Image: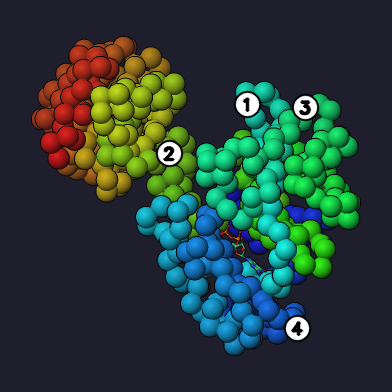
Amino acid sequence: MKIHEYQAKELFRRFDIPVPAGAVASDPETARQIARDMGVLPLVVKAQIHAGGRGKGGGVKVLRDLNEVRTAAAGMIGMNLITHQTGPDGKQVKKVLVEQALEIARELYLSIVPDRKSARHVVMVSRAGGMDIEQVAEKTPEQITKIYIDPLLGIQAFHCRQAAYGLDLPPAISQQFVPMLRSLYKLFVSYDCSLVEINPLVITTDGKILALDAKINFDDNALFRHKDILEYRDLNEEELLEIEASRYNLNYIKMDGNVGNMVNGAGLAMATMDIIKRAGAEPANFLDVGGGANAEMVENGLRIILSDKNVKAILINIFGGILRCDVLSNGVVQAAKNTGIEVPVVVRMEGTNIEEGRKILTESGLGLIFAADLKDAAEKIAKIVRKK
Ligand code: GDP
Ligand code: MN
């Protein structure tokens, strides 16, 4: 789960990680009042969306006048902000963060992520802050220092020294940085984060180090033990179809391709996506209907796939084990009746009650395309979407 910058900064404050003074507003008048009550200028107004790159997209504005704060907030709230991280559709801005603007001497980068390969936490620091870190990693990887931390031992003084050295911090700044890094690590571990990122971490002209930006992602599977974080959830930011799928206990992830697919079992679903790509087409989603699916879940799954306007054809790949082929087939027929399937559907089905399942589908008059095996199914579907 992702949260907003202003929420991440609330958490930072709780862990004594220094952030600029500020507050969040949902309308321009409140933004102006916050600015007036803060009694400082210049100020910065920042659009709150679950995506970075706002600076370049017009979602971060430094202002020298109270009325400008109002105008900037009015311009941002309700605006559809497009950045390189939002995708082409952009995200609607509902809130802005009003903060004291800082005089920046240096912009740095700091993050912590779990590293699966080494089974450690990795602290990443770079002197090249404020930029797109993916680009830094690609073009000048030597500018990123990685410090691996054994989660059993936790963060030690030498890790902090390595990080401070990597950032080339003078002693006075280093003294502020070390407790900050320790707190960030503590936050990362105690909240089961999958990412904490400060980009930029800034050194001000008056010699302070602060988190100018804040990004935190949480491991969804650990959220049950962090009820306070669940309150930060913003459904406006989540994919509508994914929210609907979670209501029906379907594991659905939307993607950018045009081949919708419905599979039972996560492993088979991943293999299906691989083989779709291998045949030269792009999957529109990941959908695991689960082993214990019934006709209704199959129908809900198909309806969700069909709500994605990019879908040009559907591949159903079911290995009938617990989910029997006749149950699946009834679900498909039911869905076709209730929602109307207007795109070609290729079916690859094997397993329990296969004969019965095929009979139901053939007699349905739906004009489904049967595939002999998975490879055949992928080739057939790729051929269909290529023609479109
Ligand atoms: P992002 O583009 O979505 O990652 O948003 P950030 O919070 O990282 O802000 C983008 C950029 O705006 C920063 O790298 C800074 O250069 C600039 N910026 C943000 N806040 C301030 C501020 O208080 N003072 C100054 N001078 N620049 C700021
Ligand atoms: Mn940033």
Precedes in sequence: disc 3 or disc 4: 4
Residue 253, which numbered label?
A: 2
**Image coordinates for residue 300, horizontal then vertical, percent:** 35, 39
Task: State left or right for residue 159 relative to residue 302.
Answer: right
Type of residue at label 3? Asp
**Image coordinates for residue 112, horizontal then vertical, percent:** 69, 40
Precedes in sequence: disc 4 or disc 2: 4
Please determine whether, in this image, residue 206 is positioned above or below residue 336: below
Q: CA distance from mark 4 to mark 2?
A: 46 Å
> What residue sits 71% from the left and 73% below the top?
100
Name the one closer to the observer, 201 or 270.
201
Precedes in sequence: disc 3 or disc 2: 3
Q: Secondary structure at mark 2?
A: strand
> What residue sits 67% from the left and 23% below the top?
118
Task: State left or right for residue 89 relative to residue 340.
Answer: right
Q: Residues within 10 Å of mark 2 (few under 14, many from 20)?
A: some
Q: CA distance from mark 1 to mark 2?
A: 22 Å
Residue 39, which numbered label?
A: 4
